[in-house]
Image (tube, rainbow, N blue to C red):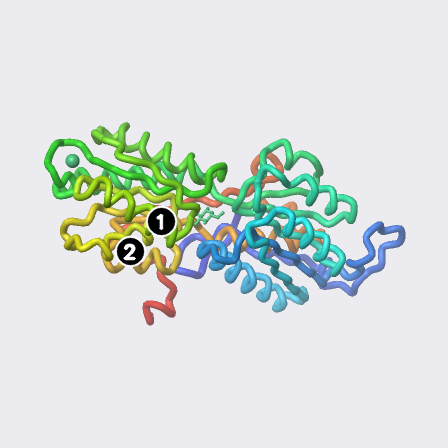
């Protein structure tokens, strides 16, 4: 992973490396099993993702489309077709079939059910169309079913550790977090979908990290809100009704759920000084804004730019047969982008230049 990231002056993990081969005129390879891709400088990417209401994924895919467009400057004609599986694996399987029929050269799949990719893998292998899975990680054995299967995502353990460190720092530096002064932090957790690699792992690591940092904790409750802001608001309203002013800390597995928790407090009649501390994960546009405004004490950056860029680089390389050798993989198939901690102190580094007007 090389190069320099322009945005925010941060280090860029991926760079577009276009060799001469792909700029050469299209070649017809005799005996090639795959008919649709006769020109190596044309890349049609088919994408299907689990649900179009997901804030993080919409932002990631926006970056991905931009990244693919950038390849045009290097003489690679890219097109992308995106489908919303609307939460149904059956629908997603059909979409994969349709995308392959439409001539897609490579697929980027965000599984609805990360334990159920077999039908998709069979379809792709039968048509020799490589797959880059992203964000919802298939189990390791499934990725071994074929050599043209890859995964791009982030390290779930790290996001939980970072959230735990952010919360520990706040508790140690700001005595007001322990509102009732009993030396313990009464907390609730808002969890993502059961079975998602980022849900349970984030919670466990955040709590474990706080304990390791000497924070005394008292768990009041866990609620599943499926990454969703409205569900989180609803769950949080129930928690407020049950625990009232005892809640001192809300750990949410993503920003949208942390925002839903804030929404619940805004409707609750509590004064702002009485609110608990809120922590999210993602650093979506709305999540970053919540850090700027002080409604979140912190969040953890889930590097959508880096993930989108890795997906684009990998998808293009798999079709043009150029550049794959320059990419770094874990276990030959995996790319994990690192997370970063965000507080009011560094949030500006993560805001778009356009948003800050600089
Ligand atoms: C993100 C969530 C998102 C989920 C979707 C997670 O990595 O943090 O915001 O809803 O992926 O699969
Ligand atoms: Ca307390």
- Judged from the image, the secondary structure of the residue bearing numbered disc 2 is helix
Where is residue 288? Give x, y as percent.
33, 57
Where is residue 318? Give x, y as percent.
68, 50
Q: Give the left or right position of residue 230, taking residue 111 as reference.
A: left
Above or below 172: residue 74:
below
Q: Which residue is mark 2?
A: 263
Looking at the image, is mark 1 or mark 2 earlier in the sequence? 1
**Image quadrant for the C terminus?**
bottom left
Q: Nearer the viewer, residue 95 or 109?
A: 95
Q: Which mark is residue 12?
A: none
Q: Give the left or right position of residue 91, taking residue 153 as reference.
A: right
Residue at (61, 46) in percent of width and height:
89
Q: Which mark is residue 232?
A: 1
Residue at (43, 46) in percent of width and height:
226
Where is residue 260? Give x, y as percent.
33, 53
Above or below 344: residue 113:
above
| Residue 154 seen from this side | yes
Q: Is the Cβ of the residue at disc 1 closer than 8 Å to that at disc 2?
A: yes
| Residue 322 seen from this side | no
Where is residue 220? Give x, y as percent.
26, 34
Above or below 146: residue 347:
below
Circle 2 residues within 10 Å: few <14, some 14–19, many ≥20: some
């Amino acid at each position: 992973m090389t190069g320099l990231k322009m945005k925010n002056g941060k280090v860029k993990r991926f760079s577009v490396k276009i060799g001469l081969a792909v700029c050469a005129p299209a070649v017809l390879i005799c005996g090639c099993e795959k008919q649709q891709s006769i020109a190596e400088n044309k890349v049609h990417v088919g994408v299907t993702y689990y649900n179009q209401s997901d804030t993080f994924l919409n932002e990631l895919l926006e970056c991905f489309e931009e990244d693919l467009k950038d390849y045009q400057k290097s003489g690679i004609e890219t097109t992308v077709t995106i489908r919303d599986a609307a939460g149904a694996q059956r629908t997603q399987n059909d979409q994969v079939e349709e995308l392959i029929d439409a001539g897609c050269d490579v697929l980027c799949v965000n599984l609805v059910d990360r334990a159920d990719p077999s039908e998709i893998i069979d379809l792709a292998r039968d048509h020799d169309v490589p797959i880059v899975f992203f964000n919802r990680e298939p189990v390791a054995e499934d990725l071994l079913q074929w050599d043209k299967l890859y995964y791009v995502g982030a390290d779930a353990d790290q996001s939980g550790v970072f959230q735990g460190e952010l919360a520990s720092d706040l508790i140690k530096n700001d005595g007001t977090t322990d509102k009732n002064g009993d030396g313990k932090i009464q907390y609730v957790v808002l969890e993502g979908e059961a079975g998602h690699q980022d849900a349970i792992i984030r919670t466990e690591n955040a709590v474990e990290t706080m304990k390791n940092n000497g924070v005394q904790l008292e768990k009041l409750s866990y609620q599943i809100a499926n990454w969703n802001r409205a569900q989180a608001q609803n769950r949080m309203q129930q928690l407020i009704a049950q625990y009232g002013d005892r809640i001192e800390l809300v750990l949410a597995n993503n920003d949208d759920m942390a925002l839903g928790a804030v929404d619940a407090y805004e409707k609750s009649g509590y004064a702002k000084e009485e609110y608990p501390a809120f922590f999210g994960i993602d650093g979506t546009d709305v999540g970053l804004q919540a850090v700027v405004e002080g409604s979140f004490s912190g969040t953890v950056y889930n590097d959508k730019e880096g993930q989108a860029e890795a997906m684009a680089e990998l998808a293009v390389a798999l079709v043009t047969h150029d550049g794959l050798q320059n990419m770094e993989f874990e276990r030959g198939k995996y790319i994990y982008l690192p997370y970063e901690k965000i507080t009011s102190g560094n949030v500006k580094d993560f805001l778009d230049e356009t948003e800050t007007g600089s």
